[in-house]
Image (cartoon, rainbow, N blue to C red):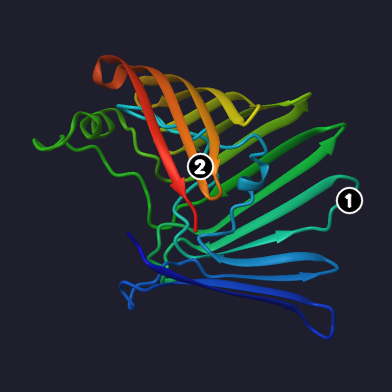
Amino acid sequence: MVKKLTIGASGTLANGLGVSFSDELNLAEVDAEINAFSLTLDSAVGSLNFKNGGGDAVSKARVAGDADVDVNGTNLGFHGSKTAEHGGMGILWTAPSVGGLDLYVGWSPNSGGDGLDSAGYENTFSVAAVMDVSGMSIGAGYAAASESNAACGAYAAPADDMTAAAAADHIWGGDYCGDQTLMHVAASMDAGDITLGAGYSVLDTDEADKTVMHVSADTTVGDYSVGLTYRNTVKDYEVVVEDTQSVIALSLGTSLGDGVDLGLSFSTADTDLASQIADDNYYFAEASLTVSF
């Protein structure tokens, strides 16, 4: 468990510029950086955020969530917000809201934490828009990354000690690498006491591609919060092979008292791994107890 100290401050300068700052220190290893630095400047022309690993505007478009649910066995993944590695400093500009429309523009100058020209990706750009219309939130985002030193590798015979999944990626071309684009559209709305959501995203790379679709419903019944999610993920390999996974997940949560929360989650996953000539069905169940001080 990481022991950390969070430092934060905010205020307004005499010229009206708002400034907020936060960072985290690893108390167990003083030489290690948690890379949680964040600085935000607010003014009449919007806000500008500088953050380690930030600059991903697409995350703002995920108004229905990312459909990240727990499964047993292979997990083909959920909605991502980044095309490639974002290890370096990212910049996100949030424009002033106009008529219920919010606009975001992101820029990641260098994917390497050291900012060297040997980084895999340089100058990754993203843009997103979110609009609230008659109780419905609609989000759309797009990102593009051109590789600098992250080209897809040439084919080579798989090593003897590779796992089945790694060997399949090696043989059929299953890495998310090279030039990449990410598109995401989503919507959410309240229907009485139920919040409905849906999302669709496509990650297109020089080798493998990933398409994710999900629908969800969340509500509160008495003292319990209930969530139901259906997610379908398709992984297209460079060679004509396609893995698919359909997941149904149910979550329950309630408070047992001040600072004590109980959570229950269950999922079933129907997975067709054509790349490994395998068809698996898995069940997942978990109970969690969270205590806050």
In this view, which residue lies farthest toward the front?
A: 257
Q: Is residue 290 above or below residue 275?
A: below
Q: Is residue 24 above or below residue 77?
A: below
Of 80 and 1, which appears nearest the observer?
1
C-alpha gap between disc 2 and disc 1: 39 Å
**Residue placed under numbered mark 2 in the picture:** 261
Q: Quadrant of residue 223?
A: top right
* Residue found at x 33% / y 78%: 31
Q: In the image, 95: left or right of 89? A: right
Q: Earlier in the sequence, mark 2 or mark 1?
A: 1
Identify which amino acid the numbered label 2 is placed on.
Asp
User: Callout 1, which amino acid?
Assistant: Val
Residue 139 locus on image (x, y percent): 72, 38
Image quarter (top left, top right, bottom left or bottom right) of the N terminus? bottom left
Residue 254's x, y, as percent?
A: 55, 35
Query: Where's residue 259, x and y in %?
Result: 53, 50
- In front: 68, or 240? 68
Q: Dot 1 surroundings within 10 Å: few (below 14), some, or many (20 or more)? A: few
Left or right of residue 97: residue 251: left
Q: In the picture, residue 287 is in which quadrant?
A: top left
- Local crowd at mark 2 within 10 Å, few (<14), some, or many (≥20)? some
74 up-or-down from 180: above or below: above
Q: Picture coordinates of residue 122 (x, y %)?
A: 50, 61
Query: In the displayed image of the protein, which residue is found farthest to the bottom?
Result: 14
| Callout 2 secondary element | strand
Residue 98, label in figure: 1
